[in-house]
Image (cartoon, helix red, strand yellow):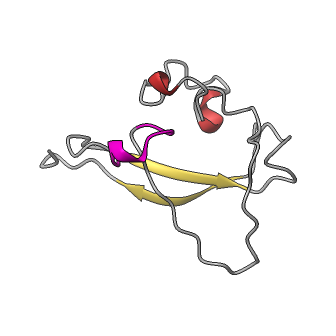
């Protein structure tokens, strides 16, 4: 997640860069994590800005596509997330009628 919220919705220019891991600053671990038992159901909240829930979810004018991937890591605090092991949990294709 970007440390600078103003870059949260900026596109990633180089798709071969480590920014593809979790966006800008995505290879830096996070200070807080939530444990989940095997088989647990998880829910996610999508925001325009990572530090401001009042700004809503992905803008209605976004036509897609959009995909969400996860990766099992030993530690979300210290693992960079780079490399193989990513798996898709959700996707939505292009929608001409959006927004």
Q: In the rendered view, tell whether residue 20 sits above or below residue 90.
A: above
Observer able to see residue 41: yes
Is residue 63 toward the left or the right of residue 11 in the image? left
In screen coordinates, is 96 left or right of 16?
left
**Corner quadrant of residue 89:** bottom right
Q: Residue furthest top?
A: 13
**Residue at 76 percent of width and 77 percent of height:** 37
Q: Residue at x 73, y 41 (%)?
A: 30
The residue located at (43%, 25%) in the rendering is 11
As rendered, which of 20 and 76 lies closer to the eye?
76
Q: Is residue 27 above or below residue 81?
A: above
Residues shaded magenta = 49-57
Q: Quadrant of residue 27?
A: top right
Residue 65 shows up from this direction: no
Q: Does the magenta portion include 54?
A: yes
- Which secondary structure is most common in the magenta stretch? loop
In this view, the residue in front, 57 or 17, is 57
Q: Quadrant of the C terminus?
A: top left
Q: Position of residue 9 (x, y in %)?
A: 42, 30
- In the rendered structure, the answer to whether residue 87 lies left or right of residue 78 reads left
Residue 70 horizontal/vertical position (percent): 64, 54
The picture quadrant where one finds residue 15 is top right
**Residue displayed at 24% across by 43% down:** 63
Quadrant of the image for the N terminus?
top right
Q: How many marks?
A: 0
Residue 36 picture location, percent across and down: 73, 71
* Residue 71: image location, x then y, percent: 71, 53
């Amino acid at each position: 997640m970007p440390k600078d919220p103003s870059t949260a919705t900026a596109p990633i220019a180089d798709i071969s860069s480590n920014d593809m891991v979790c966006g800008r600053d995505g290879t830096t671990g996070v200070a807080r994590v939530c444990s989940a038992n095997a088989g647990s159901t998880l829910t996610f909240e999508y925001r325009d800005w990572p530090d401001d829930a009042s700004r809503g979810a992905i803008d209605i004018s976004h036509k897609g596509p959009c995909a969400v991937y996860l990766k099992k890591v030993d530690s979300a605090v210290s693992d960079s997330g780079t490399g193989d092991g990513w798996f898709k949990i959700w996707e939505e294709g292009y929608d001409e009628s959006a927004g």
